Amino acid sequence: ETHHVKAATTENNGNDKDETNLQIKAELDRHASETMHFSVYREDLRNRIENMLTSPIEVAEKLWEVKISSGAIGSSGAISKVKSEAITTRQQVSNEIRALKRQPTKGRLWKDAVADTKPMESVLLFRSHHALADGASIMAALSDLCDEAEEIRSDIEAELKKWKRGKQGKKGVLRRLISRFMRLIKFMMWITLGSARSALYQVWLQLTTRTNPFDAVRQDAEKKGLAMSGQRAISWCDACPLDEAKRMTQILSKASGSNITVNDLFVSCISAAVTRQLIEHEEFMAPVDAHSRKRVARNINVCIPVHLRGGVILPNESLGNRIGAFVTRVPGEMTHDARGGGTPSCPSDRLMKVHRSLKRSKQSPAPILSHYVAKFCSIYLPEQWT
């Protein structure tokens, strides 16, 4: 009788596991889909990304979704043809060397069979509603799925312990209390004075920003009878690897004595690209609608999102939304932008102005204020207002 009871219990446990696995599979099937790459190079991928950016998520059904496609490397356009050819060549050489080591007497037949094996790639498109978490929290959750998750977590904890030991040092109890009190005083002064300065800066931006630089584009489109869809569109090119961008910022930081970041470089490139687009539009529309004044502003207001914890989620810290933002002014049209003129120093001039503008705003409490004001409004104000 005991044997039968154990057998029945084991069978029930097996059924429960099977049922749980089926539920997990059903959830994955509802959130994830997998196909092969489409045929048109890069165009199909661009359309899929645009669709994920523009079509809303049905929040009542799911908060996230994943779309995976696979195919020969370079066939989707996510990796450029030059890079995919380099990867394919490296893998073919590696396969040939490995084949000769394993079967040195079989000749060309084995080597050709292995060398003809082309590498594959997979493109994973993931999106989620911001109610689920911010970008840093999502990356922390995904990193926990990696094989090196425990090692990364232990390294972070070790660095935190080292930082705390160095911060405490050999100070006595009284000196530590005084140090904490002084930090509290400095923080209160920073919040008070910084909040007032940030508010005045936003008022100044509102008063000195008279037009939207894209109003001219919209007006010209309406005159020509073109419909403005208002949808997002994407485009990309292979500018430079991240390591090269970091090396560039390090060189410029040493030369200027400032701490220029990759984010500064990115914002500088984006502002230059937007300015170039507006200038080209103005020159294109000039024969149709002649105008005497320049439509391209000398400054552009940009909104920069900021993670309040520096983009790092510590071990045992809950996921969530810790995103603030600030609005600042960066250079628009500069003297070297028009018609390709200027000197080689012009891009660095733009970068330095962007760096100083972002640094001034990042050192203010504006991101913290925007986060908590948005949180207060979403919790306490009526839904129709927010």
Image (tube, grey):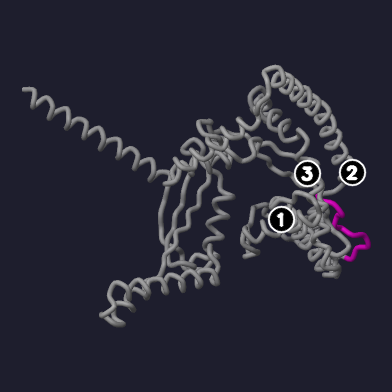
Location of residue 325 by image quarter: top right
Q: Can you identify the residue that label 3 sits on? A: 359
Please state the horizontal and vertical placement of residue 55, each as a whole percent of the image: 56, 48
Q: Position of residue 186 (x, y in %)?
A: 78, 26
Residue at the disc numbered 2: 208
| Numbered marks: total | 3
User: In this view, which residue lies farthest toward the front?
Assistant: 170
Q: Is residue 222 visible?
A: no
Q: Main secondary structure of the magenta part?
A: loop
Magenta residue check for 251? no
Tell me the number on the disc at residue 49.
none
Q: Tell me what residue is drawn at x 58 percent, y 35 percent.
A: 162
Bin the neighbour count of mark 2 within 10 Å (Cα to Cα): few under 14, some 14-19, many 20 and up.
few
Earlier sequence position, callout 2 versus callout 3: 2
Residue depicted at 41% across the width and 71% down the height: 94
Q: Is residue 167 above or below residue 102?
A: above
